Structures are given as C-alpha cells and as structure tokens.
Amino acid sequence: MNRFYDRLLGHPRVGEGTAYAILVAMGTCHLLNDMIQSVIPALYPLLKDSYGFTFAQIGVITLVFQLTSSVFQPFVGSYADRHPQPYSLSAGMVFTLFGLVALAFAPGFVAILLSVALIGCGSSVFHPEASRVAQMASGGRKSLAQSIFQVGGNGGSAIGPLLAALVVIPYGQSAVAWFALAALAASLLLGRVGRWYALLLAASGRRRRTAIAAAHALPKRVVDKAMAILVLMIFSKYFFNACMTSYFTFFLIGKFGLSVQQSQLCLFAYLAAFAIGTLLGGFLGDRYGRKYVILFSILGSAPFSLALPYLGLGGTVAMAVATGLVIASAFSAIVVYATDLKPDKVGMVAGVFFGLMFGLGGIGSAFFGWLADLTSIDFIFKVSTWLPLLGIVAVWLPDVRPANTTHTT
C-alpha cells in the first residue's frame, strides 16, 4: 500500500519546519469533506417531494446526520489520542464515499438514514484526526496551520449548496453519486498524508515529543475554567453566525427589497470575509498570542455587529463584511489554545470543539427560526448582534504561550 501511494502521489518527506504541502492537502480535503456535508441539507426539498416525507422525517434525517457527524467526534478523537492510526483519515473518507453512493440510490427513509449516518461517521473520523495532523505539520505555527485547515472547510460549506443547485436539483437524487468522486479524490490525497504521518511516527519511535508549555504548570481548576470560557466563546460565535448564514438574506429582502439573487451576493460577501478572517486569525495568533486574538475576534466584532441592523443597505453590507472578517479569526485560535491547555488530548479537544461548532450552529439556526416565527426577522437580528459582547469573558483566560515545538504522537 505504501508503494502504491509513493508511486501515485510521490514520496512524502518528513523534515523540520512547516510542512505546507501537508497543510494544503489537509485544507483541500477539508474543503471536499465539508462540501459533501453541505450537499445533504440542500437535498431536503428534493427528498421531501420525491418520497412525500413529513417535516418530522426530515428532522430525523438531520438528527441522525448531526449525531454521527458531531456527537461522535470527541470519542473518535479520544481513541486516536491513545491509538494513532495514520491511514484512518483515508479510511474515514471511504465511509463517506459509500454513504454518498448509498444515498444516491436509496429507495426509502431507512436507507436514507443509513446513508447519511455513513457520511456523518466519515466526518467524525476526519475532523479530530485532521486537526492533529495540521498541528503536527505546523512547525510550531499552530494557529496558521489550523487556519489553513479551517478555511478549506469554510470554502467547502459555501460551494456545496451551489453545486447541489447545479448538479443534484436538475438531475435528481442519483446525481449525488457524482460527489463520490470528490470523496475518492480526498481519500487518495489523505493516503499520502497518512504515509507522511506513518513516517513521522516511525521517526519518533511512536513516542510523543511535547514541549514543556506554561499550560503544564496550570492547576486543573484553572484549565477547567479556561475550557468553560472557550465553550462560551464558541456559543457566542456560532449562534451569531447561524443567524447570519440562515437569515441574513431574508433580512435584506424584507428590509431593502432586494431580489433573492442580490441577497445571495451579499451573503457571499459575508462568507468571503469570514474565510479571509480565518486565515488572518492564524497569522495573528502565532504572532501575538491566542488569548488576545480570541478577545479581539469576539469582542472586537461587537461594534460592527451592533450597528448592522440600523444602517442603510451599503452600511449593512459593510458592517456584515467587517463583522465576518473579525469574528472568523477566533475559531482556529480557540482550538489551538484548547490543545495547548490539554496537549496530550489533541484529538479529543479538536473533536469536542468541532462537534460544538456543528451542534451549536444547528441549534442556533433552529432557535432563531423559532424566534423569528414568534417575532420577526428584524427582531432576531437586533438580538443576535449582542452576542459578540460575550467576548469580554476572554479577559479571564490565562496567557498561554507554549514554545514553538512540533507535537508528534
């Protein structure tokens, strides 16, 4: 198998410094993985019409997918911390491939549930272990590495619904099978990454080389308090982002009379700023410290978000772009900061925070939809824009600045 990957993809080299080829590969695979995931919700109207599903059945499909793709991530990450498997990333993408093919030809409700469960399991395997690999390839620039990885996911989430509209909706459920090609490409690329990972394990004799960081001296009470603050930061960021991604177009259409196409372009501007901010946060986190990037990212976006509901069209879009640019820089810093607090549990911590990202995003979207039905779209934007003020609690995070040493397992 190793010879196959070397012949097909070239022989991966293990060296000092930042392994940009591995980071780009991981970002690309993250793009393909999240693109595939975002196709599933875009498929719901077609499935509802084809099979006569109720909204409750659609909700069960979402529940199964969310459970397998988010709730399992901490457990997968915890297992990987104790038993690293270099080729598990490639194997996980094979689950996704089989799930896509099964979904394309699923004859009914139960088969669809099994299909999305397979896709979700593939995602659960991918995210925590991929975060570990990104940190191993960082050469000490962990925030930058996490940002390169994360921006791929942001791009995939944006591209998926567009491809679904172009490919799946016109040609039907069976067209989902074409996305299996993306899973196959990702699996092959992750095979190369797995080969690099295996070489790194062999070079280190399967012993962890971990920098003695300031976090090691922190008492458990302080670490637990810091983790609780980070969870609150994730809540603030992804509840706000859920309102933006799900309802910003409705807000613009209702307040300014934009067409659907015009509102989608405005949403794209926010998402593009979000992607740029993700990379920016990586550079700043390595240079100035993760704590200060988290504080700046969440709390610093508040002036822009608070002004957003009260301006004209140009000002609203400008504030949305500024908010996306600033608030997006937090996630990579949060994940890396958390792994600095628990350096022996990188996979588990990454799984927890990616699971929270997916879970809170879904809960936030449902909550603001429920609240909008009771009140109005204008009201939920006035409420959601206060969420970044929760960033003030980041002041109480301990200042953790570990030495720039690569973690290997």
Image: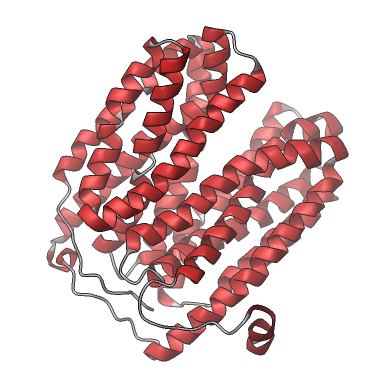
Comparing 307 with 103, the one in front is 307
The picture places residue 186, in percent across and down from the top left corner, at 65, 64
Comparing 310 with 242, the one in front is 310
Taking 287 as reference, is 269 above or below it?
Answer: above
Q: Which colour scheme is used?
A: secondary structure
Q: In which quarter of the image is the C terminus?
A: bottom left
Instruction: Judge from the rendering whether residue 296 lies leftward or rightward of residue 89; answer left or right.
Output: left
The picture places residue 307, in percent across and down from the top left corner, at 33, 17
Q: In which quarter of the image is the N terminus?
A: bottom right
The picture places residue 31, in percent across and down from the top left corner, at 58, 53
Looking at the image, which residue sits at the far front?
314
Q: How many marks?
A: 0
Instruction: Judge from the rendering whether residue 329 lies leftward or rightward of residue 73; answer left or right.
Output: left
Quick check: can you spot residue 42? Answer: yes
State which quadrant residue 380 falls in. top left
Residue at 52%, 8% in the rendered image: 255
Residue at 36%, 41% in the rendered image: 234
The picture places residue 208, in percent across and down from the top left corner, at 33, 81
Taking 70 as reference, is 237 above or below it?
Answer: above
Comparing 35 with 221, the one in front is 35
Residue at 36%, 48% in the rendered image: 280
Quick check: can you spot residue 229? Answer: no
Taking 297 as reference, is 226 above or below it?
Answer: below
Comparing 311 with 84, the one in front is 311
Instruction: Judge from the rendering whether residue 60 lies leftward or rightward of residue 200; answer left or right.
Output: right
Instruction: Judge from the rendering whether residue 205 lies leftward or rightward of residue 373; answer left or right.
Output: left
Taking 234 as reference, is 285 above or below it?
Answer: below
Residue at 39%, 41% in the rendered image: 328
